[in-house]
Image (cartoon, rainbow, N blue to C red):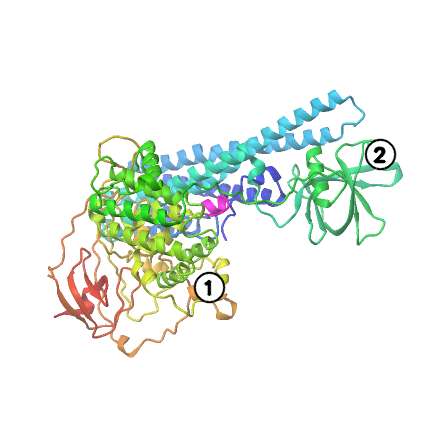
Amino acid sequence: MGLQPLEFSDCYLDSPWFRERIRAHEAELERTNKFIKELIKDGKNLIAATKSLSAAQRKFAHSLRDFKFEFIGDAETDDERCIDASLREFSNFLKNLEEQREIMALSVTETLIKPLEKFRKEQLGAVKEEKKKFDKETEKNYSIIDKHLNLSAKKKDSHLQEADIQVEQNRQHFYELSLEYVCKLQEIQERKKFEFVEPMLSFFQGMFTFYHQGHELAKDFNHYKMELQINIQNTRNRFEGTRSEVEELMNKIRQHPKDHKRASQFTAEGYLYVQEKRPAPFGSSWVKHYCMYRKAAKKFNMIPFEHRSGGKLGDGEVFFLKECTKRHTDSIDRRFCFDIEAADRPGVSLTLQAFSEEERKQWLEALGGKESLFHSFNRAIIPRPEGSAQLDKMGFTILRKCISAVETRGINDQGLYRVVGVSSKVQRLLSMLMDVKTCNEVDLENSIDWEVKTITSALKQYLRSLPEPLMTYELHGDFIVPAKSGSPESRVNAIHFLVHKLPEKNKEMLDILVKHLTNVSNHSKQNLMTVANLGVVFGPTLMRPQEETVAAIMDLKFQNIVVEILIENHEKIFRTPPDATFPETTCLSASPPNAPPRQSKRQGQRTKRPVAVYNLCLELEDGDSSNPPKEDTPTSSADSLSSPSPTTAAVHGPPGPDKNHLLADGGGSGDWASPIPSQTRSPMVQWLNPQSPTTPSSDSAVTPPSPRSSPFPLCPPAPIVDKPPESVTSRKARAVYPCEAEHSSELSFEIGAIFEDVQTSREPGWLEGTLNGKRGLIPQNYVKLL
């Protein structure tokens, strides 16, 4: 489990656990700051002295190997795992250069030292300043509250009202500062992954230039760098999308904090001051406690906590509530007080003080006290406003009309579904389509009045306007689980099972849409909309959580993975029944562990695998402009099928499918999970991480040679033209070795399998062919052409 997300709603509760999570984030940033500082020092040593270069490299490599990124949430994407593993890869590379004593160029200062110093000064330094402000405001806020609550109730009403206003203004200022600090903490945790690794990548490029003997090693390292650059870009793109969602949620909570309180197991919770009576000469004292109450069990918990000292002041107390009574100021010289009596402690009564009259009324309501108002502490999920779009006959008509028009007029348009239409035109078209009187009059296939981007935007808007997402709130969490762990095959099977749990209308419409998206992805060489790009577009459209939280936003990348799986496996998921042995969906509610990668079970596995070149995403604009979409990076030619990098297989097991390496994709889905003892695994975890015997079959005794992979030029990506192997025209082939696919783009087969329509792949050492209606990659030296 990584760092827990910091929820903006918790800024208003300011609970002990919230403070502990903040300290965990701060500790991680401090650790990162110290590490970067040490890394900068090591880099300068490399430039300073040739004689100490070898020792400095060993130290540098050791530092890289020992550092590991923390992540927010309960799982990482494949790109994030690759970024985490990248430091170990860099460490291994440095060890191979230990004996080389060439003097590095002065450009190392520009490519490594300055960017790290800038990141440490501008980013980590900014967080430190925010922390000082936050700590100072915490001290000020609770000092003012203490002073305010000590005011005598006998003072003039005008004086008390003025004091109340002043305290409330100070509290609002504290909440504003707390929200901004929490947002900054989470932003820097996500930002550091790519802003730190990118200078490292530039540094290694510089080393290849100045080391003649390292040139050959650089060629072997190129494919990994290419993949890492894509991983970094993927992570950066997800960061941008996630940051905008987080900021939007923060602004919503800032405007209406009471409407966005998270669901809680407690009927009421918050800080109260508890009167502690002392012997007669010493009077009494008031100690702040964090109190929690469950109405169903009448169970009351109190934990003493002091923000200024930064921790608990003692053990908590638990008792069962008997009754609650409001205290008036004529019986006690403090405001906002009430008494509670414990059922399991006869004769024991406690006096508590709330922060305000409103909070006292809420506590009285929750505790069943007198003079209470109907303000519930229960955290209700905010219902989404329902639009006029419905999952009915009219909805299916809209979907089919739009799809038909897109496939007729614009299937090859670049940036299809990513280029957005003008908002006013989109709304007008959607209104006409949703009107029974005008729907049949709209001719989308032949009319030039409606641009393709307007039609695609109207289709997406219709899906987003449904009262409930197409893949339902109920199954949202279940769909996310398999995207976070398991082998590619188990992920597909899990999604297959869940799709058939959808209501019939939802499944039917999803089938129509995904079939269309599969067709769109088949034209990706023309429209640049690969499976990964479509996942980015339709992940948030088809799936969304019912409650908006930071934790839910962090799962956006896994929604994209689910959509990618649907597109890649449309025929299997929608045309065949799911596995009847799959566990009940109740097992899906518990998120599987983020298990480490495992090695392939197959004997004689290939040690080198080809690196695919992927289309890059478009930066799209909204508006009437007729100019073509702008591209933020050069585009490369793409294959319909691709494989992960060979380098990382020996270190951290088989990488994920091709969709993990596309710029701006929605997250990886090719994770491999290590076996877990069956007696400790839940049914869902067992299903996602099956244990299989490792004994090879008789057919696998012969170890075939490994296909070779060709290195690719260094990032940033540019159009690449490889020299293909000997051309193979379309023909048949027979398997001479058995093979178990390690990737969704490969084919599994036994000895003697006959492949149809076999053609040369762009990947050296690989062919493309069809087996039992499925097309995929085939190792060239595993088959014999017929």
In magenta segment, residue 553:
yes
User: Looking at the picture, which amino acid does disc 1 mark?
Assistant: Val
Question: Closer to the camera: disc 1 or disc 2?
Answer: 2
How many residues crowd mark 2 within 10 Å: few (<14), some (14–19), many (20+)? few
Q: Which residues are magenta?
A: 545-554
Q: Locate residue 486: give its quadrant.
A: bottom left
Q: In the depicted view, which residue is nearer to us: 538 or 211?
A: 538
Please indicate, yes or no, whether residue 98 appears anywhere in the rendered image.
no
For the question of whether residue 445 can be seen, the reply is yes
User: Which label number is shown at residue 331?
Assistant: 2
For the point 52% across and 67% down, the residue is: 680
User: Does 542 sit left or right of 277 as displayed?
Assistant: left
Frontmost residue, 245 versus 501:
501
Q: Which residue is mark 1?
A: 685
Where residue 294 appears, x then y in whole percent? 68, 50
- In the rendered view, would you say 569 is above or below 752? above
Which residue appears farthest toward the right when viewing the image? 280
Q: Earlier in the sequence, mark 1 or mark 2?
A: 2
Query: Of the residues shown, which amino acid type is indicated by label 2?
Result: Ser
The foreground one among 576 and 250 is 576
Q: Nearer the viewer, residue 227 or 758?
A: 758
